[in-house]
Amino acid sequence: MTQKKILFISPLIPCPPEKGGNPRTYEIFQTLHNFYKVHLISFIEDDREKSFLNGLAPETFDLIPKQIHLGRSWWKRPLVGLSSAFSRLPYNFFKFKSETMKRQVNKMLQTGGFNAIHIEHLNLWPFVPEGFPVLKVLHQHNLEWLSIKRFADISLNPAKKIFGWMDSIKLKAAEKEACEQADKVLAVSDDVKQRLLSLTNGKIDVSVVRTGIDTEAWRPGDGPCDSSKITFVGKMDYPPNVDGVLWFSSVVFPLIKRWIPSAKFVVVGSNPVSAVRALRRRPGIQVTGFVEDVRPHLRESAVGVFPLRYGGGVKFKILEAMSLGVPTVTTSIGVEGILADSGAEVFVEDKPQAFAQRVIALMTDRGLRLELARRARRRILSLYTREQMRVDIKEAYENLWSR
């Protein structure tokens, strides 16, 4: 039997998570590469990213320089936002505009003999051309339109609120159209699957591919934790993380300090923005910036907090904390898409006072910490392993080929 060929389009090189890559993208790419011939087309922002291909071993690849490189430049984002406001394209589509990418995708589909094109993010759907006899797979990491709407709902800046609402409307229409055009949609969770079915009136073929954790690498530690330590882990230039950390630091952490004066909040993650770096001036708050390995920070913590107020999709860092056996407190948005029992495997609170009380309870009750940790680890082992994720990916594609 001739081996199937897949054109894999990604917003970034699917490098290992320890190199800063998206763990889902990496695992999906590697699984497909194990069974099929895969050609990778990816954006890059810096030539140094080419080293990420070491050990990845795609059959062939093309790397496309990103035309609109936002980086951390404060002046570029408003200009791109203003341009997209007067465009029919949502902001995230506008960011990825590239004639070079468009031409390369068309060229490969014309000459490569591919059976399927795998689009690793909704933002890249505009690069899928019409008229080619190729199966189209769209990987939905979350509901993009809902994430933007949630941002608009909590924003106190009138301009950002209006822009967010407008962009969410454009994104919702684009998301619906893309899912309906795809031959197969991969959803990150059952929750996202149901929302996508509702959005499209059940007109799509969607399979759930749950996120998988390397449970051996992310296993509980043997040493005691520091009962005064609270830790957040995540990229600190990612807006939902920034918002959550600032909210927790300003509203929740002071409530905890009243009861436990020795409490310390440690923010672990790369590229902290200026507002996060400024937290270092507050008593009891540490901001580490980039660290090679976040596991020691989590293992020695009494509590892991993930106080997200907007965003979407399954939060990989919460699954990692649960796998490590770190008692976790999060919000309803943070736990969204994760099949975990609130109150038994993770604590879920949206109000500052209730959130603080849960953290305090875990900091002061060792037995409660151990029980929550044990149950959380058991949940990960039952549903969120890399082995199960690979099975989900293989089954989704076998279902696609059987059409």
Image (cartoon, helix red, strand yellow):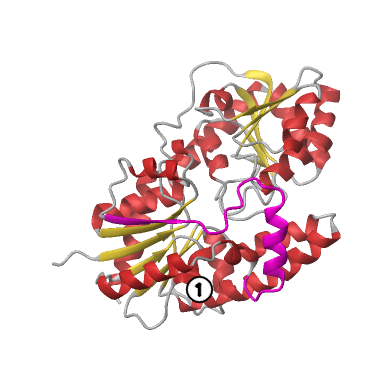
Of the 4 image quadrants, the one containing the C terminus is bottom left
Where is residue 143 shown, x and y percent of the image? 59, 63
Residue nearest the viewer, comparing 180 with 226: 180
Is the residue 347 above or below the residue 283 in the image? Answer: below
For label 1, the residue is: 179
Residue found 55% across the figure and 50% down from its top: 339
Residue nearest the viewer, comparing 313 with 190: 313
Residue found 76% across the figure and 65% down from its top: 163
Quarter residue 206 falls in: bottom left
Where is residue 43 shown, x and y percent of the image? 45, 55
Would you say 9 lies left or right of 355 here?
A: left
Residue nearest the viewer, comparing 66 with 132: 66
- Label 1 neighbourhood size at 10 Å, few (<14), some (14-19), many (20+)? many
Q: What is the three-letter code of the residue carrying label 1?
A: Cys
In this orientation, does residue 384 appear?
Answer: no
Residue found 69% across the figure and 72% down from its top: 169
Where is residue 15 shown, x and y percent of the image? 40, 44
| Magenta residue check for 97 | no
Q: Which stretch is magenta?
A: 60-89
Residue found 80% across the figure and 66% down from its top: 162
